[in-house]
Amino acid sequence: MSDPVSAKPVSALGGATFDGFAKVREIGPWGMITLRAKPGTKGLDKAVKAAVGTALPAVRRMEWSGDADTGRGCGWMSPDEFLLVLPYAEVATAIAALEKALQGQHFLAADVSDARAIFRIEGAKAGQVLAKLCPADIDRMEPGELRRTRVAQVAGAFWGDGAGYTLVTFRSVAGYAMGLLSHSAMAGAELG
């Protein structure tokens, strides 16, 4: 979403933060593209490389080109769905690159940047914040592993990088998600 006066993108919560036993912060806006294409689609790997500079990810993985907070990435969301993340200003160029590389193939590339909210959970016990909210076994997740699951009553996807976790939810529930994460990260509420 953008500010009507400046036309600059704005995040869902204006960069909200919470400090507890883990730090939670909203880190948007990021550019995000949902790419739907069957595995084996001719040129799919080259299209992703042209758009974000990464290889196609393996199942439940994120691939990165550059720093995970500011670079470009591609995540496996389902057998025929990938999430491309990149700087907000580069989305139109990336979609054009996808359309050029996949011309004549059956695919869908949609800009979902303004429909998403992105949070970062950091600290030595960052995994506990998500462990209290998700049915995923956070302790067994490897850096770069992507999970698509429920975060309390909200659909979300998240990945870890060794220093913390990045969570993507729908923008319409950003306030609720921030409340959940903040409550889960309250000092004194660590897991045993």
Image (cartoon, helix red, strand yellow):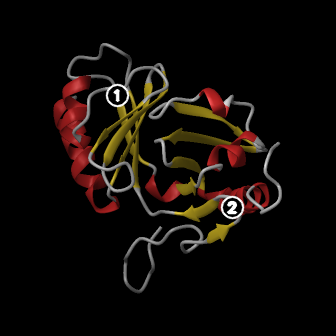
Quadrant for the C terminus in the image: top right
Depth order, front residue of 49/21: 21
- Against 62, is 28 above or below? below
- Against 71, is 40 above or below? above
Q: Nearer the viewer, mark 2 or mark 1?
A: 2
Identify residue type, mark 2: Met
Q: Which residue matches tag 1?
A: 107
Mark positioned earlier in the residue sequence (2 or 1):
1
Q: Position of residue 143 (x, y in %)?
A: 47, 34
Q: Residue sitting at 46 percent across and 20 percent down?
A: 59
Label 2 neighbour load within 10 Å: few <14, some 14-19, many 20+:
many
Q: Position of residue 71 (x, y in %)?
A: 30, 51
Q: Position of residue 158 (x, y in %)?
A: 56, 41
- Can residue 104 be seen here? no
**Between marks 2 and 1, how big is the CA–CA gap?**
33 Å
Based on the displayed image, in which of its 4 quarters is residue 99 positioned?
top left
Identify residue type, mark 1: Phe
